[in-house]
Image: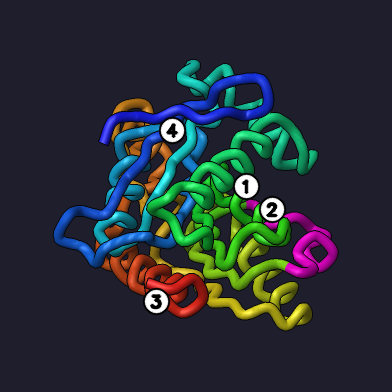
Amino acid sequence: MPGISYQVADRTAHAYLAVPSAGSAPGPWHGVVVIHEAFGLSDDIRRKADLFAEHGYLALAPDLFDGRPWLRCVLGAVRQVHARSGPAFGILEAARRYLATRDDCTGRTGVIGFCLGGGFALLCAPTGGYAVASVNYGEVPEDAESVLRGACPIVASYGGRDPMGTKHPERLQRALTVLEIPHDVQVYPGVGHRFLTEPSGAGAVLARFARMNYVESDAADAWRRIFAFFGEHLGG
């Protein structure tokens, strides 16, 4: 489906919308906000939105970079994650509201993010707008117990050979256990960062250089867990 636009305060944001096919169960459907990684709204992220649509969800992937070159935008986006505030959070909340208020949406929404988007998805989890969140190799703040108080259920996937190490999933597991938030946090020992991403363009070059390879078997298992968790906490 072609890109769509929606309002964020006094500006227009752009996104990719994936709608379940005519052969799916009839709507309205639950919604999912799909947050891209540092390389922006890529074909891989569009395919991930399409995958959610194949599973019966209305999926919206907003463009946090507004079509600008990723190198100009990524540092600013990282700063916003660390500051836990900034324009990207407005774009994401407006995306959630856009989905929730569509006639073909039930009003219930989940969120999923990858790498940079995983960090954003984690910070969206305690906002009260989502029924479930999926965090994939995203940063976890050191004060996670404080940040995630009141968060929705979270499913998370990390690579044991990620250059970030395993402190992030360990910190997330510990915080969610203490807070008694339903969760499924798993580290796949044989893979690195971005193992769920089928790279292309600049992402493919970096993936080869940094050994951040797509691993089909572990990716398949992570998707199995994600859809099972979303089915349980958001509905299918």
As shown in the figure, which amino acid type bears the numbered disc 4?
Answer: Ala
Pointer 2 and pointer 3: residues touching (CB < 8 Å)? Answer: no
Dot 4 falls on a residue whose secondary structure is: strand
The alpha-carbon separation of the residues under discs 4 and 3 comes to: 26 Å
Q: Amino acid at mark 3?
A: Ala
Q: Earlier in the sequence, mark 4 or mark 3?
A: 4
Cβ atoms at labels 1 and 2 below 8 Å apart: yes
Q: Residues within 10 Å of mark 2 (few under 14, many from 20)?
A: many
- The disc label shown at residue 15, or none: 4
Provide the residue designation for mark 1.
Answer: 120
Pick whichever, 121 or 220, lies toward us: 121
Instruction: Give the spatial CA distance, label 2 vs label 4.
Output: 20 Å
Q: Closer to the N terminus: mark 2 or mark 4?
A: 4
Nearest to the eye among marks 4 and 3: give it: 4
Residue at the image position 58 percent from the left and 67 percent from the top:
131
Residue under circle 3?
228
